[in-house]
């Protein structure tokens, strides 16, 4: 794999997952693979899990990881070609990216969408220009539209917790939030589950919260949440703002926050969320603190997802 910015960069997702689960068993089995290699973790936005799990993954492979909080410590970057930079931006990505490419063997980046201009957000300008202006592999630590390291960890979590031979029913359910949240986790989860041949995905949300069909196609869309939950093996809870009425909050109905009663209609489903989350807004204490929840295991698997991805890329260098 050259880059890791979406599921489409992965040749064989089951093979990559097997590698990740092997690292979970033996974290240091490739402790020399990344010797004398350096990974740059560029953050335009905050992070806890992604930052720390990727640092641990790099360390397990013998790599040096350097975190650069571009939003706090860096020059304000210009992305537009031909811009007259007489405003707030100080350095063009066209100049910064090749320099970063000299310093690092792999560049990882997190950048959130503005949620005002859909075309701009969905063009993924930062990731695509970073690929254009550097020769080193680029890994997404969450972009405007996708969060592939999260989705890969979600896949691992489902793989290791589902012991039956049949296909699990996985439900991605919208939940309320007080502010507009990107669609990237939902887009990415749908994209990974739809590509994974071994699972059935149902997406449930209020009208107006349809994801872009590029990501949701292949899934069953069920507006009746109670029906969607019936017999589910996994309930993945996540808020996202509207794609159609871009970036808008159209619903705040807390009926969409799953309760223990709702979960009783499932097949003893495991409850997932990528974290962070606002307790008692997106999910209640009673649900999060119940045996249904596997959110901590899910976050723990971020290390093994990142390690498998970095290892796969290191093997190509
Ligand atoms: N799930 C996730 O990406 O968490 P962080 O924002 O803390 O990295």
Image (cartoon, rainbow, N blue to C red):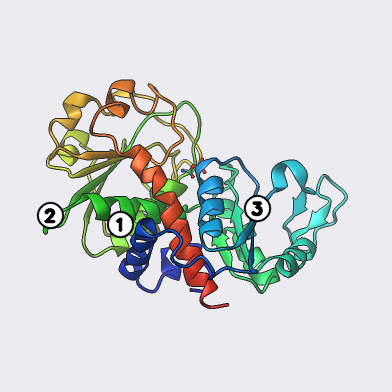
Q: CA distance from mark 3 to mark 2?
A: 40 Å
Q: Secondary structure at mark 1?
A: helix
According to the picture, the residue beneath numbered tag 2 turns out to be 164
According to the picture, the residue beneath numbered tag 1 turns out to be 193
Classify 260 as above or below 11: above
Give me the disc on residue 137.
none
Find out if the beta carbon at label 2 lies less than 8 Å from the nearest ligand 1 atom. no
Mark closest to the chain's N terminus, 2 or 1: 2
Residue 108, image x, y percentages: 60, 58
What is the crowding at mark 1: few (fewer than 14 residues within 10 Å), some, or many (at least 20)? many
According to the picture, the residue beneath numbered tag 3 turns out to be 42
Q: Is residue 183 left or right of residue 80?
A: left
Residue 45, image x, y percentages: 62, 43
Work out whether residue 60 or residue 123 is closer to the camera in this orientation and state it.
60
Q: Quarter of the image holding residue 298?
A: top left
Q: Secondary structure at mark 3?
A: strand
Callouts 2 and 1 close, C-beta under 8 Å = no
Callouts 1 and 3 close, C-beta under 8 Å = no
Residue drawn at the location 15% of the way across and 37% of the way down: 268
Q: Is residue 69 left or right of residue 267?
A: right
Work out whether residue 230 or residue 180 is closer to the camera in this orientation and state it.
230
Classify 275 as above or below 259: below
Find out if the beta carbon at label 1 lies less than 8 Å from the nearest ligand 1 atom. no
Q: Residue 208: in sight, yes or no?
A: no
Callouts 3 and 2 close, C-beta under 8 Å = no
Residue drawn at the location 26% of the way across and 53% of the way down: 160
Quadrant of the frame with the C terminus: bottom right
Work out whether residue 159 or residue 63 is closer to the camera in this orientation and state it.
63
Residue drawn at the location 65% of the way across and 47% of the way down: 44
What is the crowding at mark 3: few (fewer than 14 residues within 10 Å), some, or many (at least 20)? many
Classify 12 as above or below 28: below
Mark closest to the chain's N terminus, 3 or 2: 3
């Amino acid at each position: 794999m050259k880059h890791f910015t979406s599921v489409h960069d992965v040749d064989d997702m089951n093979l990559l997952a097997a590698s990740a689960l092997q690292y979970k068993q033996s974290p240091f089995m490739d402790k020399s693979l990344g010797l004398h290699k350096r990974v740059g973790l560029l953050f335009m936005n905050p992070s806890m899990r992604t930052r720390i799990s990727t640092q641990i993954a790099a360390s397990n492979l013998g790599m040096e990881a350097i975190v650069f909080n571009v939003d706090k410590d860096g020059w304000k970057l210009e992305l537009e070609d031909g811009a007259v930079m007489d405003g707030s931006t100080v350095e063009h990505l066209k100049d910064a990216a090749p320099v970063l490419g000299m310093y690092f063997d792999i560049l990882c980046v997190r950048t959130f969408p503005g949620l005002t201009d859909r075309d701009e957000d969905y063009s993924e300008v930062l990731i695509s220009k970073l690929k254009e202006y550097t020769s080193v592999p680029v890994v997404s630590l969450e972009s405007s539209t996708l969060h592939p390291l999260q989705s890969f960890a979600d896949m691992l979590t489902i793989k290791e917790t589902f012991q039956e031979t049949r296909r699990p029913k996985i439900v991605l359910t919208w939940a309320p939030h007080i502010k507009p949240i990107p669609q990237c986790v939902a887009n990415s989860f749908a994209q990974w589950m739809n590509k994974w041949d071994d699972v059935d995905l149902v997406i449930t949300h209020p009208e107006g919260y349809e994801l872009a069909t590029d990501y949701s196609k292949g899934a069953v869309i069920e507006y009746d949440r109670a029906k969607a939950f019936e017999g589910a093996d996994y309930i993945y809870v996540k808020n996202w703002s509207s794609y159609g009425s871009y970036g808008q909050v159209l619903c705040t109905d807390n009926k969409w926050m799953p309760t223990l009663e709702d979960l009783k209609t499932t097949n003893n489903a495991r409850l997932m969320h990528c974290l962070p989350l606002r307790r008692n807004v997106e999910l209640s204490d009673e649900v999060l603190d119940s045996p249904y929840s596997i959110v901590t295991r899910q976050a723990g698997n971020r290390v093994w997802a990142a390690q498998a991805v970095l290892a796969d890329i290191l093997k190509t260098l």
